[in-house]
Every structure is written in structure tokens, then in C-alpha cells.
Amino acid sequence: MSTTIVLAHAPTLASRLRDAGAAAFVALMLGIPLIGLSTEDQGGALAVITRWPLLAQFVAACFVGRLALIWGIDALKSRRQSRQAAGLVAAPKKHDGILRAAGWLLLGAAVTLPLFFADNRYVVDTLTTLLIYVMLGWGLNVVVGLAGLLDLGCVAFYAVGAYTYALLATQFGWSFWEALPVAGATAATFGMLLGWPILRLRGDYLAIVTLGFGEIIRLILVNWTELSGGPNGIASIPRPSFFGLPFKADGGDEATFAGFFGLDFSPMHRIIFLYYLILVLALLTNLFVSRLRKLPVGRAWEALREDEIACQALGINVTNVKLSAFAIGAMLGGFAGVFFAARQGFISPESFVFTESAIILAIVVLGGMGSQMGVVLAASVLVLLPEFGRQFAEYRMLVFGLAMILIMVWRPGGLLAAREPTLTLGARTAKETKDA
């Protein structure tokens, strides 16, 4: 049997500083004629003026940027070498190339569709709703699909994010971007508060407790009228602006989006902006979750989903793994809630009923637990199918339920079942088998 030893020679701090210093020196030489010196018309004659503070900022940015770049590249190399030494490789998945191509195709369609339907508010609004459910599905996929914890109260975190933004914006004048991280942190805190007392529960018992938690949050919002406005909800919630430019017909002395870009005012500008805003948030959510799946915490979630007792035997801290899944899933739900409140401009407890939790859970289960692409397909089915069925009026929900039954009979594991682990010991096992 042969043994492979991988030696990683990580550069020292001094060598990184020297490299960043060299990059900063080159930036200084190039920056003196391009940034440090400039000409200005003074009485018909050109005069040379200096901009040394701006040049200093440019050189400092190059120094820090080069240092961060080298550190990031070295960290990736070190992680790759450690993974190779441990024999961890990406698990081969069926139709991986087809799914990747379909993902890029869907992304291209998502970016260009509003351009073709720029004057059709119904289409853009429906697509925005679809992206909200995709983002919620990806957040719940962490808890249900990856960690294997059945959560029927995810709408509670959706409500916590929405009400946090509504209160901060209407009572304290916070902007959308200021309130977004605070609302996410608040929802994550509630996720940990929920996760802590139910660590010993599994399966149906866990589902019942999470269902009760969602109802508790809704009842608090209904009855705590001093805080939440009770059944009347909270109105006049500020909508996000485009880098400080509001979407108004006349902003008075304040610059508006249409005025700044020289466009005729149209209410569709705000609708399309909200669409692209939730598209960016959803893509960041997907990137964040996909990255977490390859980190130790993501592998711990998948191990917990497969066998909790084996995880405990291997020394994995199951408590922390469960709490991290609840906290991250709740945080992503809170972000979606912030966008929902900003888009609607009005929220009330009626927007956060159990039906919402059931739909989000159906998206995860129908798509295939653990599959990011499956969530997109399932959300498309569950959001667009009722819209197409509006012609059937009273038979709409009947058609919807029949379609759900047929899909679950045809694909009981979900549209794109992906229960395989993200990383496996396949390469190492094959090598050891060959050596043996």
C-alpha cells in the first residue's frame, strides 16, 4: 500500500506584504500621471493641479486589494490541497451537465424577461412573486433538505423579517439596506430560540412544535396591537430606492430616478427595479447556500440528515449543527420578509398564515429535498399553475391539488431528487481498493 504525503508551503506574512508593496509601487508609478496630475482650464490657459490625496487612496486600495487577493488565492489552494489529502471529491451526480446548462439558461431568461414585458405589470409582478418563493424555498432547503429537520413554521421567520423592517422603517426612519442585515439577524435569533428547546425532537414531533411556533408568532402579531398594529397591520412602509434615487414623478428639490437618467416617469420603473432586486437577493442566497454545502458545516448537515446517531458517534456536535441550520434558514427567510414588506408597502398577520408555510414546504419536497434547481422548478409549478388556472374560476384549487397528486405519484422523490452528499470519499476509496 502506498502513502501520498501532500506538503503545503503557505507563503509567510512578510512575503505577502512584499508582494502587495510591489503592486502598490506599480500602482503609484502608473497613478502619478493618470491620477495624481491633472490639467484645469484657468482663464484660457491650462494649469497643472495635483491630486495627491486621491492618489494615496488609490495606492492604498491597490495594496489592500492585492493583499486580500493573494490571501484568498492561498486559502483556496490550501483548502484544495487539504481536500485532496483527505480524499474528498465532489460527488458525481446524474445529469450534472444538463442541470448546469439548464441553470444558465434559466438565469439568462430571468435577466432578459422583464425587458420583453416592460409594459406588462402582471407578468413582472408574477415573476417577482415567483422569485420570493424561490428564495424562501432555498432558505428552507437548508433546514429540511440538507439537515433533514422538518419545519412547518418557516413563515414565522418570514414574518419576523417583514415586521422588523416595517418597524425600523416607519418608527426610526431606517432605509431598506440599513434594516436588511438587522432583520436577518433578528430572524436568525428567533431561529435559534426555536431550535434550542426542540433539539431532542425528531420527525412528526418536531413538525408539530414548529407548526405551533408559527401560530404563536401570528397570534402575537394579532394581539400585540401596540407593536404590530394588530389586525390592521403596518402601512406606509418605505420602498427601496435606487442608490438614494426614489421612484417618484416629482421629487421637488430631491433628484428622482427618472430625472437623474433623463427618462419619462413610469410606475413600471419601480416594478422592474423590485424584480431585479429580488433576483439579486435570490442569486446571493443560492450562492451562499451552495458554498455552505461544501464547507464542514454543510457536510455536517448532510451527515445529520442521513444518521444522527452516527454523527454523535463521530464526535460531531449535533446541537450546534441543528442550531446553525435553523439560524441560517431563518435568516434567509427574514431577508425574504424584508423584501416582501418593502414591495407591498403594507403588511398584516393575514399575510403570514400556515398556508404560506405549507406552500414553501411543498416547494422543497416537490422539488426534491436538497436540490437547488428542484426548488426553482417546484416554485414555478406552484406559483404559475394557479395563475394559469384562473380561467377555471372555482375549479382552480381542484386542478392545483390534482396536479400535485399526479406529480407526487409520478415522481415521489421530487422533481429533481438530490439526496447524494455534496462531497464523497470516492477517490480515496477507489485508490485504497486498487492498492489493496
Image: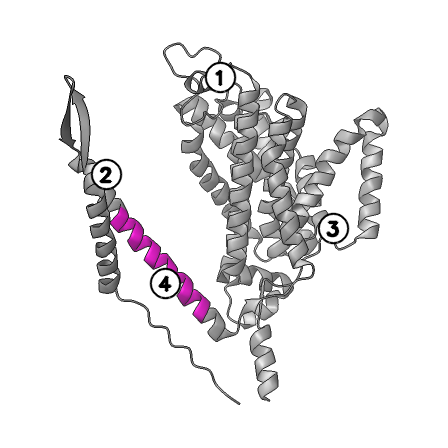
* Residue 34 disc label: 2
Gap in Å between the C-alphas at discs 3 and 1?
Answer: 44 Å
Residue 177: image quadrant is: top left
Image quadrant for the C terminus? Answer: bottom right
Residue 64 lies, in percent from the top left, at 27, 50
Residue 132: image quadrant is: top right
Q: Earlier in the sequence, mark 3 or mark 4?
A: 4
The amino acid pointed to by label 1 is Leu
Q: Name the residue under label 3.
A: 415
Proximity of marks 3 and 4: CB atoms separated by less than 8 Å = no
Gap in Å between the C-alphas at discs 3 and 2?
Answer: 56 Å
The amino acid pointed to by label 2 is Leu
* Residue 263 disc label: 1
Q: Is residue 416 visible?
A: yes
The one of 49 and 152 positioned closer to us in this rendering: 49
* Magenta-drawn stretch, dominant element (helix, strand or loop): helix
Crowding at dot 3, Cα within 10 Å, few <14 / some 14-19 / many 20+, comes out as many
Indicate yes or no whether the magenta region holds residue 80. Answer: yes
Residue 133 lies, in percent from the top left, at 63, 38
Apparent side of residue 43 relative to residue 368 in the rendered image (left or right): left
The one of 248 and 350 positioned closer to us in this rendering: 248
Q: Name the residue under label 4.
A: 74
The amino acid pointed to by label 4 is Asp
The amino acid pointed to by label 3 is Leu
The one of 412 and 361 positioned closer to us in this rendering: 412
